[in-house]
Amino acid sequence: MKSQHVLFMVGLMVVTLASCSGGSKVLAKVNGEAITEDDIVFLGEINPRIKMQTATPAGKKRVVDNIIEQDLLYSEAQREGVSRDAKVKAKVDLYRRLIVAQSLVDRRVEEAAKKYYNEHQEEFQKLALSHIMIGYRNPDEKRDAKGKTAKKEPKGHTEAEALKIANDIKARLDKGEDFSKLATELSEDQASKKQSGSLGKVWKKEPRYVSRGFEEILEKAFTLKVGEVAGPIKTTKGYHLITVTGGAELQPFEEVKDQLVQKMSGSTRSELLANLKKKAKITYPQEEKTKKAAAAAKTPEAAPPAEQPPETESQPVEPVAPGK
């Protein structure tokens, strides 16, 4: 959290010191120096959280006020010669290293995001899909926790009832009634009926709907023309009538860049660091010194050599005369 705050403050200083303004809208002036719309955009590129904050007028005003405060503090610091202090210079160098290092990571992450985008085009081919769902109860709901037949009939349609209702709605649609109107009136999917049955833009393996068991619906949708109605299609949730309200289009990279960067950032950074560590020679002198000392303490001292008996001087043997 502290490092994020540091980078946030550095970001504000970068905007103040290196304004990228051209002819863009001026949002404020500090002693004649302009803070522009381009400055805010640049700051949002540095920090996505700030980009989200500046999406509202109140949030943008807070960011502009922060820039003004930083500019005032910086100007006063310069007047007092704070930037010449040795510790301040060391901090500036540290922050510069952080920014440059993070810029490398950002570059690699964007490269990975573009590579993923180019290799997974199908994932970004999306169409606008709507549905009408008629749910049915699970047959197991007729039994209580002990497996006995429940005394009260559970709420909801039987499967046969749900299918009949769905077919009746399909007949009305075939006669020309408005899909969105019937979805609002009759669909039992409470979330989408408030949006006239809209499920938003989806691709063939949209995770939020695959998790609900809608795979067959998604597959069928990509075979339909705009305005064409299909169904009833059975899922574990009920019977569905579907229609495509907007044809499949490839989303531009810039439109999905932020979500891809978020998806790729962790793994890309880890892979980059792993490769750099393999190439680098990294040592920890104090740890190695400690290990050597510990190893020496465990090694037993060599035993002194065994004492040898003193050597005795050999006496010459006298020859024995023959015949004695």
Image: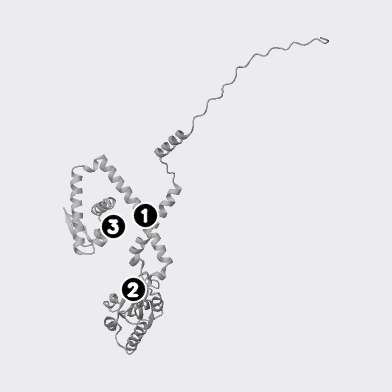
Q: Nearer the viewer, residue 201 or 67?
A: 201
Q: Nearer the viewer, residue 317 or 54?
A: 317
Q: Amino acid at mark 2?
A: Lys
Q: Nearer the viewer, mark 2 or mark 3?
A: 2
Quarter of the image for residue 288 reads top left
Work out whether 42 lies above or below 183: above
Tell me the crowding category of disc 2: few under 14, some 14 to 19, or many 20 or more residues within 10 angstroms, Cα based. Answer: some
Instruction: Find disc 3 in the rendering and name its residue.
Output: 47
Residue 164 x/y as whole percent: 35, 86
Q: Amino acid at mark 1?
A: Val
Residue 37 x/y as whole percent: 23, 61
Q: CA distance from mark 2 to mark 3?
A: 27 Å
Query: Which residue appears at 36% of the width and 61% of the height?
Result: 263
Query: Which residue appears at 37% of the width and 78% of the height?
Result: 139
Instruction: Find disc 2 in the rendering and name its residue.
Output: 201
Mark closer to the chain start, 1 or 2: 1
Question: Do residues under tags 1 and 2 come within 8 Å of each other at their CB atoms?
Answer: no
Instruction: Find disc 1 in the rendering and name its residue.
Output: 105
Work out whether 182 lies above or below 66: below
